[in-house]
Image (tube, rainbow, N blue to C red):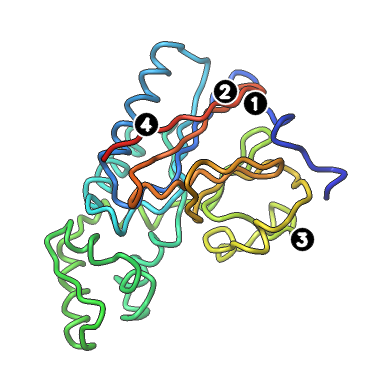
Amino acid sequence: MTSEGISFDEAAAPEGLRLYAIGDIHGRFDLMAEMHARIMDEIERDRPNDWRIIYLGDYIDRGGQEAQVLDFLARTTAEESRVQALAGNHDQGLLDFLAGKTLDNLFVNNGGETTAASYGVSLQADAPPDEMRQTRDSLLKAIPQAHIAFMRDLPLSFTYGDYFFCHAGIRPELPLDRQVPHDLMWIRQEFQNHLGLFPKVIIHGHTPVRRADIHANRVNLDTGAWKGGLLSAMMFEGKRKRLLEVALS
């Protein structure tokens, strides 16, 4: 794979296409709105031949503005096909909870109370099963169907030029077209510890870092927006790459 791989420095977007990738939002609508507006201003100013804005998943939990985030993304992706969004493990966790697959999962134990609160529902992680079922029923009534449909329809990856976009990463020994959903949404160590090049440069989030983490084989754009107030994105055009950051208190 190393001999056939491509490095970050050499990677290129398709000719005539400008790409933007945006890291994990986690309920920070304020940061997302500022970043999206900044990118759209660039697009309107520069007028590239074609463009995509790719959100890398994890739109909910912890930030407190989850309903606004999902409302914006559900509407925007429906109105503009060049704005695209990927599935994150937190987004899938909410769907699993709503489907009744488990009452004690990622959503319940990792920030789901802020997502519930953004829809006017109280969630307590240590609630007994009967109360948790009532919470689930209340969320099902409170969350607009458009938000649920948006999350259900999220793809797991996109490929453009020399770049492969996903939420968490890939399993190094598998070809890109044979990656499995769990790895694309959850993988960490096996992917991040791999030093060789991949067939394409992997653009991902999932693992929070202080600043965007750029390697020869991958770029991590999850800069812990919900906690530190820094949202990161990267622009790709030809062989050019440029980091964008939005920081709010």
- Whole-percent x and y of residue 196? 78, 50
From the viewer's perspective, is residue 239 above or below residue 65?
above
Q: Secondary structure at mark 1?
A: loop
What amino acid type should be assigned to the residue bearing mark 4?
Glu
Residue 176 on image: x %, y %:
69, 52
Identified at 68% across, 63% down, the residue is 190
Q: Earlier in the sequence, mark 4 or mark 1?
A: 1
- The amino acid sitting under disc 3 is Glu
Pointer 2: what residue? 17
Mark 1: give few (<14), some (14-19) or many (20+) Cα within 10 Å.
some
* Gap between marks 3 and 1 measured at Cα: 26 Å
Which residue in the structure is indicated by mark 1? 14
Q: Earlier in the sequence, mark 3 or mark 2?
A: 2
Q: Position of residue 51 (x, y in %)?
A: 50, 25
Quarter where residue 113 is shown = bottom left
Task: Give, as a three-letter code, the residue at label 1.
Answer: Pro
Q: Which residue is mark 4?
A: 80
The CA distance from mark 4 to mark 3 is: 35 Å
**Mark 4 neighbour class, 10 Å CA radius: few under 14, some 14 to 19, many 20 or more:** few
Q: Determine which of the numbered discs, if any, sits on residue 173 in the image.
A: 3
Q: Residue furthest left?
A: 120
Q: Against 73, is 82 above or below? A: above
The spot of residue 200 in percent (x, y) is 71, 42
Q: Are marks 1 and 2 in contact (CB under 8 Å)?
A: yes
Please tell me whether mark 4 or mark 1 is closer to you in this view.
1
Residue displayed at 31% across by 38% down: 31
Front disc: 3 or 1? 3
In primary-sequence order, the first of circles 4 and 3 is 4
